[in-house]
Amino acid sequence: MTYPSSFRCKVLSVRKKEGLTIAQAARFCVEIASVTHWVKNPNPKQTRNKPATKIDMKV
């Protein structure tokens, strides 16, 4: 799931303002790994690095 830039920025600003750790910032119901990635790059990716997978409905 991709979170909007506004939500990401809000989580990061609250983290900085309150001096929270990454684990404490995850209280916004997001994974710790997500917050870690957002610290490095808060902007969501616009493209995929792999093609879409076709689901076989017969299986």
Image: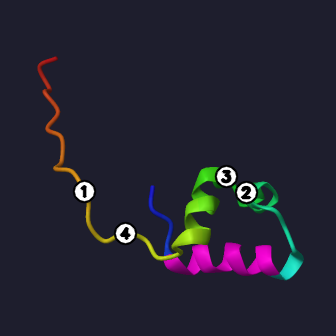
The answer to which image quadrant residue 15 occupies is bottom right
State yes or no: discs 2 and 3 in contact (Cβ < 8 Å). Answer: yes
Considering only order in the chain, which callout, 1 or 3, is on the residue closer to the N terminus? 3
* Residue at the (51%, 78%) spot, across then down: 5
State yes or no: discs 2 and 4 in contact (Cβ < 8 Å). Answer: no
Considering only order in the chain, which callout, 4 or 3, is on the residue closer to the N terminus? 3
Label 4: which secondary element: loop
Which residue occupies the extreme top position in the image?
59
Label 1 Cα neighbours within 10 Å, binned few <14 / some 14-19 / many ≥20: few
Considering only order in the chain, which callout, 1 or 2, is on the residue closer to the N terminus? 2
* Residue at the (18%, 40%) spot, across then down: 53
- Give the extent of the magenta segment: 5-16
What's under tag 4, amino acid-wise?
A: Lys
State yes or no: discs 2 and 1 in contact (Cβ < 8 Å). Answer: no
Which residue occupies the extreme front position in the image?
40
Tag 1 residue: 49
Tag 2 residue: 26
Task: Tell me how far mark 3 sits from mark 4, CA to CA.
Answer: 18 Å
Dominant SS of magenta comes to helix
Tag 4 residue: 45
Q: Is residue 53 above or below residue 8?
A: above
Task: Tell me how far mark 3 sits from mark 1, CA to CA.
Answer: 22 Å
Tag 3 residue: 32
The structure's colour scheme is: rainbow
What's under tag 1, amino acid-wise?
A: Asn
* Residue at the (45%, 55%) spot, across then down: 1
What's under tag 2, amino acid-wise?
A: Ala
Label 3 Cα neighbours within 10 Å, binned few <14 / some 14-19 / many ≥20: some
Q: Residue 16 placed where, x, y %? A: 79, 79
Task: Tell me how far mark 4 sits from mark 1, CA to CA.
Answer: 10 Å
Task: Tell me how far mark 2 sits from mark 1, CA to CA.
Answer: 26 Å
